[in-house]
Amino acid sequence: MQKGHPQSIILKFFFLFIISLGSLTSFAQETAVKGTVTDASTKETIPYASYIVVGSGKGGRTDADGKYNITIDGNYTQLKFSYVGYKAQVKTIKPGTTQTINIQLQNEAMQMNEVVIKGGKKPKYRNKENPAVELIRKVIANKSKNRMESYDYVSYKKYERMLFSMSNLSDKFKNKKIFRNYQFLFQEQDSTKIGGKNMLPVFQQEKLSENYFRKNPEKMKTVVVADKQVNFDPRFVDNQGLTAYFDRMYQDIDIYDNNISIISNLLLSPIAEGAPTFYKFFITDTIKTQQPQLIELSFTPRGKMDMLFEGKLYVTMDGNYAVQNAYLTVNKDINLNFVRGLEVKLEFDQNPDKRYHLSKSNLIVDFGITKKNGTGFTGERTVTYKDYEINHPPADDVYKGSAALVVAPDATKKSDEFWINNRPEALSLNSSKIYRNLDTLQTIPSFKRTMDIVTLFFAGYKDFGPFEMGPVNTFYSFNSVEGFRLRLGGRTTPALSKRYYFETYAAYGFDDQKWKYFLSGTYSLNNKSIYSFPQNYLRASFQRDTKIPGQELEFVQEDNFLLSFKRGDNNMMTYNDIYRLDYVHEYENHFSYSVGLRKWNQSPGGGLYFSNTPQTLFSKANQINTSEITVGLRYAPHEKFYQGKIYRVPFVDKYPIFNLRYTAGLKGVLGGEYNYHNFMASAEKRFYLSQLGYTDVTLEGGYNVGKLPFPLLSIHRANQTYAYQLQSYNLMNFLEFVSDHYASINIDQNFNGFFFNKIPLLQKLKLREVMSFKALYGGLRDENNPDKNADAMQFVRNQDGVPITHGLNSEPYIEGSVGVGNIFKVLRVDAVKRFNYLDNPGVSSWGFRARVKFDF
């Protein structure tokens, strides 16, 4: 299965805490209560009514349909319900049972002897002649003037605080023996809040920045002047990547955007241009006690399972139709994995011109394996804006430089006194202790030992200080050429040197009885770890090992044990001796270039052979020797990623990624036998489609100049494993197609449950629909086609003399798939269909492929 996805890595990190801190499950007498809260007079449901367990402080709010559902630990006997304008009501519950209690709240202004008679059905909701819809359309029409982009210049200071905690911890867990001397780690809060009563903070970050916006030419500049965060042992956690991940999940919330990013999903804003099509709006109150007067506008999705918000907007009635306050949440049944609760609160202040700007935002998300009670994680991000100035041009040098984000050199070195004087709101005593508490937690010997063991299990490396051994999943594998294969390796760490790094492994195949090995030495040119951004290093390496031509894997090693299981015949490999010298240089703006020199000697193994004449197919050429120089360019604007132990995992976002590579073969240099020029270019981008999910599109093309044997042409990415590979052709056999010029398109569509959410029997499963389409157009010039040039290296044939390697003709190779994602929240299964070239030997016209993916 696939590995290395950002969500899985981050979830694994937090599982380290769970495993390290012991068993998290506590059992107590549980009482399950559900029901509906309605108006006693009108019988209409009351959304967002509050309820609380008397004596415990635990509670919540009803959903948009007035329904509630709560599981209570302990022998509590009463629930209290309340809502503004209604008399509170207390109901008796029976501990230890499952029960339904419906509540009818009475309006405080209602005369008890009054009789209200209401006949007929509740009218169907319509947009036409609906005053709430007319109001929201005025809000939408005035969006442009209520946005920052309506001003020529804007500047402001911004304070951000991110807190991530283990949440909903039971008293039994808190009082475990292991925590007897560490009670200071826990914090208590009002248990009616998201996250429950007991919490254990595991991460905190604060950031202060100065921000400048210019309309023409448009540019946004952010200068981070102070940054303070919890730092974990870098042997276990990439601190920079962890921060990037939280920034990706908890982005700034702009109610005026058409789509709002929430935990890596885009949800349609309630004031988007198309909002009246997907939301229902209701005028629920008029607030006349302040100026300007406000209209309370409640909204819910038309379909409760849709990936949409519900909540309330407070709209100014001063002609601006601006949002002064907003409360956003989501239905508990929405198709968001692991999310048990979500709340967004936005506050706006007036500018001198009587318009409004965002002054404070607060986003809280509670995550858990199950929707019911139990230990989980709660993340809270609070952002405060101050010193908001409009149309005051700053100094010209503010916008100098291409980087949109600049971090002051001393940003991470600010004193405690600086933070005390510059925070807009003082931290609570408990919050101010989090940094020191978590530093203390990491010194607990048992915690360090467990982190070390679990890191070995998840990341694949065992740390021994200056050297770490791994990756574990490559220690054992098998294939039809080498048979049973054992491998052992490792690499040095920054504990040995921050300048020099060495990596090695040795492997042995018990069938071919050959040793394979690798050795590399790397010199860091910027005195930073070669695994941290931005990279700037020089590396020399030698590798003697096997390779399957045409197998390109994403974030996994080719000798990964799970990838040993393959379909069909796959007994063709090359034995390779590769000498390399590489230079890599990245820049802060995410442009990078690389220059590489490679001497490559490859010889056939297993069922593969190199033959120069069609008459003597088994008169094998023993070796192909090449020497080449490669220049690569890459540009990934605004890219963020998590740096794992083995590879870097990017967080897929709306920004494109461009690659360009040129390789020149050097005949007569270090034994090189061929002159050639290879060009490759690719572009990839995610397109967000609001309610229809998102589409990942990759375009790629290549061109090879020169007369070459087929192993030096473009061998198209094939996949004979049972794991679904996003960038490979999942029903193409290894070495089936080669080209000297090609173009391809890869489209992967995820609908995020848009259709399944509307099917009653499938709603509860929270499945997601996926589709893909892949097309490859290519070909061979006559000089490289053995069918038209007898001097060209012959394609591989099977035992019956039938070619199994081909060039593409005028018809492109096409395959597609339809599948179901989010099975058990982690599994995607695709039914893949191959549409042409079905007469090639050993091919399958269809098959099932699976992919493990943690996603929200």
Image (cartoon, grey):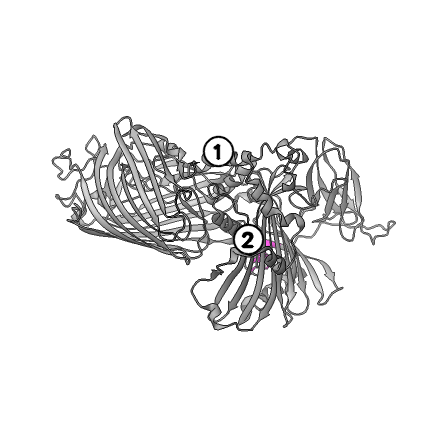
| Residue 279 visible | yes
Does dot 1 land on a helix, a strand or a loop? helix
Q: Residues within 10 Å of mark 1 (few under 14, many from 20)?
A: some
Instruction: Identify residue type, mark 2.
Output: Lys
Residue 173, image x, y percentages: 64, 34
Query: What is the CA distance from the residue labelled 1 to the residue labelled 2?
Result: 29 Å
Q: Which residue is mark 2?
A: 228
| Residue 705 visible | no
Q: Is residue 807 left or right of residue 81?
A: left
Look at the numbered discs 1 and 2 and tell me whether their residues touch, using CB distance below 8 Å. Answer: no
| Residue at 86% from the left image edge and 49% from the top image edge | 112
The label on residue 453 is 1
Q: Which residues are magenta?
A: 268-279
Give residue 157's quadrant in the image: bottom right
Query: Is 473 or 113 nearer to us in this picture?
Result: 473
Residue 222, image x, y percentages: 51, 62
Q: Tell me, yes or no, whether the highlighted magenta stretch contains residue 270.
A: yes
| Residue at 20% from the left image edge and 51% from the top image edge | 676
Q: Is residue 523 left or right of residue 181?
A: left
The quarter of the image holding the N terminus is top left
Q: Tell me, yes or no, whether the highlighted magenta stretch contains residue 181.
A: no
Instruction: Identify residue type, mark 1.
Output: Ile
